[in-house]
Amino acid sequence: MKTARRTDAVEDRAPHVHDVHSSADGSTRLAVARLLLEQGPVTAAAVAAELELSAAAVRRHLDALIADGEAQARQASHRGPRGRGRPAKEYLLTDAGRMRFGHGYDGLAAAALRYLAQTAGEAAVNAFAESRVAELLGPEAADVAAAATPDARADALAKLLTARGYAAQAREAGHGVQLCQHHCPVAHVATEFPELCEAETRAFAELLGTHVQRLATIARGDAACTTHVPLEGPELLRRREPTTTVPRGRQPE
């Protein structure tokens, strides 16, 4: 049975239409992804038949989903004698592709923490937050702490957070460094439970070996989580500057 999804795909019924930037093209790709979600693993031919698309259009959208890490192909299961020609492929969404349609993880996590607070108290929530950040940083935290200076440790921490999916960077800011996290996977939960952010801030201070200050958080609606890391000592204030160069307007320290 055909579904209403095919009405989104008018622009691809003619093979010569290739405007991949159009909103109609985006809705077609969404329709292809939704079909993989609902019926996958499914062949390209089945996608074309269900959505009334051309074979070329289906291949283009499937290739784009694969390139974005949202879909994957595998050899189709085969029943009966194999015919001539190349084996058919089946397509299905990856975990990243399923996220396009949302999930209930945030709601589940918030509900679990709510239950923990009600049954075991706020101390249990704080203990969980401490445990979570320790697991987040993992054994690589020792490498961060081993760096020679606070700014070097901030750089190492930014790389570690980026590897954990936080898109972090350390950049100079006055007499210190700002550690910026441009993504936070737990931001929605942290909006209700700021203990997650507070435990993270304490862990950063311990790793960096200096007092830090949270200036902004995604959980509060800011564009990024920003932590100020002060640099103590004149040798640290000249972060990455040649020792023979004195910036204009600054007196030698």
Image (tube, grey):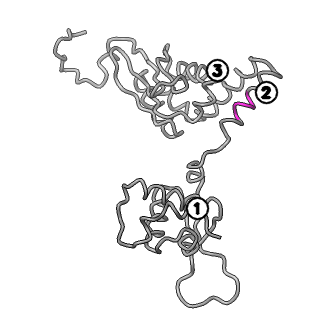
Q: Answer with left or right where residue 123 lies relative to residue 208.
A: right
Nearest the camera: 18 or 189? 18
Most common SS among magenta residues: helix
Three-letter amino acid code at the position of disc 1: Ala
- Residue at 42% of width from left, 30% of height from top? 155
Q: In what quadrant of the picture does the N terminus appear? A: bottom right
Circle 3 sits on which residue?
Answer: 195
Residue at disc 2, secondary structure: helix
Q: CA distance from mark 3 to mark 2?
A: 15 Å
Q: Is residue 204 above or below residue 5?
A: above
Residue at disc 3, secondary structure: helix
Of badges 3 and 1, nearer the viewer stands 1
Can you give x and y, in whole percent of width and height, for residue 208 in the image?
49, 21
Three-letter amino acid code at the position of disc 3: Glu
Which disc is residue 4 wearing?
1
Q: CA distance from mark 2 to mark 1?
A: 41 Å
Q: Answer with left or right where residue 86 lies relative to residue 118.
A: left
Disc 1: CA contacts within 10 A as few (<14), some (14-19) or many (>=20) = few
Three-letter amino acid code at the position of disc 2: Tyr
Q: CA distance from mark 3 to mark 1?
A: 45 Å
Which disc is residue 115 wearing?
2
- Residue at 60% of width from left, 31% of height from top? 188
Disc 3: CA contacts within 10 A as few (<14), some (14-19) or many (>=20) = some
Q: Answer with left or right where residue 151 lies relative to residue 242.
A: right
